[in-house]
Image (spheres, rainbow, N blue to C red):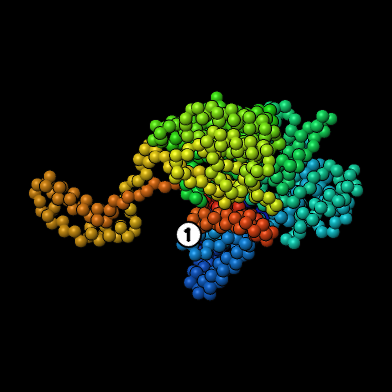
Amino acid sequence: MDLLMLSEINTMKKEDLKNALLDLIDYVKKANKNDSVMLQILEEVKKGSNEREELKDEMTQLKSNNEVHVLLKELADVKSHLSAFHLHQQPTMENDSSPPPSFADAVKKSVHAALKEDKAKCDVIISKVEEKGKNESFVADLFSTISYDTKPIGVMRLGRKKEDTHHHRLLKWSFSANFEARDFRSRFEEVRKDKPNDLSGFHVRPGRNQEDQAAFRKSAIVANTFNKEAKHEGDMCSYSVRDSGSIWKFEKQADGKWVHISDWKLEKSFFANSNELMNMMTTINYEFPIICLSETWLGATSCHIANIPYYNHEYSIRNARIGGGVSIFIHSNISNYSVRRDISILNSHIESIFIEIDQSFISADRNIVVGCIYRPQKQSAIDFNEILKSTLDRLSNENKHVYLAGDYNINLLTANSHLSCSDFVDVLFANSFLPTINKPTKITGSSATIIDNIFINNLTRASTTSGILANSISDHCPVFCFTPFHNNKSNQNNFITKRLFTDRNKNKFHDLISSTQSDQVLNETNCRTAFTSFYTQFTTIIDKSFPLTKIKLGYKNRKPWLTGAMKNFIKMKNKLYCKYIKTKNPNDQKQYKSYKITLRSILYKAERTHYDPPCVGQA
């Protein structure tokens, strides 16, 4: 029998190898120890064993070699520099004692992930290409049609082929690192205008990295939700996700054609800004008892999935149109409240939702009514003022604390020059309502207006505090108002006592236990007395080592991945935003937007790393 060598085994088919090994096993069982083939087998086994031992010795020497340690250190430095280059203009932690972002180490250790992200920008995805013939032939013909010189280094179909012959998988082309996919698409679009018959059936887009793909999927979910609502409301509008991830709105005209509504912006919706809102709440370390939001863009379906953790949601939404909508989020600590449907109004001139909180719950002298109001910008301010007057007249007769928060789209700075604004102010003043905000809340490059406000009739509360939060959640600045009511139920557990089991305290406990004399306990003949003595000694040591400490219950971090450094990054972004709206300098605007984009990427990667750590290391 001829002995199989390793070189032969590596080239054998699986079934042939299996049969050969079975024959070899049978032969070994029957052969005697002096058989020539058996001796050759033993020699090969011995040779392989010696080679493994030599390899182990070499690995041991490498581990103990100082030069290897130096190389590893230099490699770590190179990775760090590459990471810093990849995160250009990333906010830095200056004079910050808090721990670094949780994802930083993962980024430094994952240069491969960064390279993979960059490589995605060199890919081109084309759809609606029939799956017949060779993909390479189609690519060659297309490049010849558009007269493009650069050739791809790889061509492949994405996904598993389906039985449906009308469904064609996406075709991906991969290019070298210096290739610009967007330039290729521009060239493709230019040629398609001249040769519509040859290229009209195809759609070309650049590849997406993981972050862009996640954002695209999120936009797709929102667009699908809007489309379901639009279909329910008459199917007169449609929403689609563009290659960039932005959502476009189309309306159906009388002639049946669909027209793109260019002034529609998703940035106003709840889903587009909910993460920014929760990041802001985490940064300022405070849970607002009541949060009022206008222009939520919620519908009959999406209103049920719009939520803020630990808040109850009351809302008023449009039934026949997309857009608008008002919501009040009430903290779960406030249980004794009711929705005032009798004064909540929803029509083309005003959208409002009111709640009433029982005075006993917050130890107030009367009930508190909170309203969220939105006036559609293009609707009549005169009709709005009439409806608002009727509502306030009724509330004034109820003798309650009232807070009116909302986007009125009436600029208080024009009260002396515009009749509708003057009438609006007169309606409020006549019912003893005063504004708590006297600075612009919507600032653009060419204007500044006070259109967002919180009006209160609680004139007896001189300690009421209000202001504007410098945060670019949307195109309006958030406003706030505090009134120090004392809620016995919510404040009774503001402090707790606990023992701190720090390393220092543990060491102290160990030292005290070690130095304690236990003779008195061991020599005691009475069991009850011995236990009492032991218990006294032990509790005394516990109290000395881990004393009870009074701890204040603060805001619970709903986003555990948001580190102290990241909170500082968010504060810095808000400072840059304040600087821009004060100076209106284009350079300040550019700096703010650049910082905001970089920070958004950092927060996304941090959250992804926290909830799915293996993905970052394996990307």
Q: Looking at the image, which residue is at 72% across and 48% down? A: 244
Count neighbours of disc 1 (C-alpha within 10 A) and say few if under 14, some if 14 to 19, many if 20 or more: few
Q: What's the amino acid at mark 1?
A: Pro
- Residue drawn at point x = 64 percent, y = 32 percent: 384
- In this rendering, the answer to whether 508 lies above or below 354 is below
Number of marks in the rendered image? 1
Residue 462, placed above or below residue 110: above
Q: As rendered, which of 396 and 36 lies closer to the eye?
A: 396
The answer to whether one can see residue 360 in this image is yes
Question: Where does the image place residue 289, in percent across and percent down from the top left?
Answer: 47, 40
Q: Is residue 15 left or right of residue 487?
A: right
In x, y percent, where is residue 273? 60, 44
Question: Mark 1 highlights which residue?
Answer: 99
Residue at image point 60% right, 64% down = 84
The answer to whether residue 6 is visible is no
What kind of element bears circle 1?
loop
Residue 546: x percent and y percent? 28, 54
Look at the image and tell me in which quarter the N terminus lies: bottom right
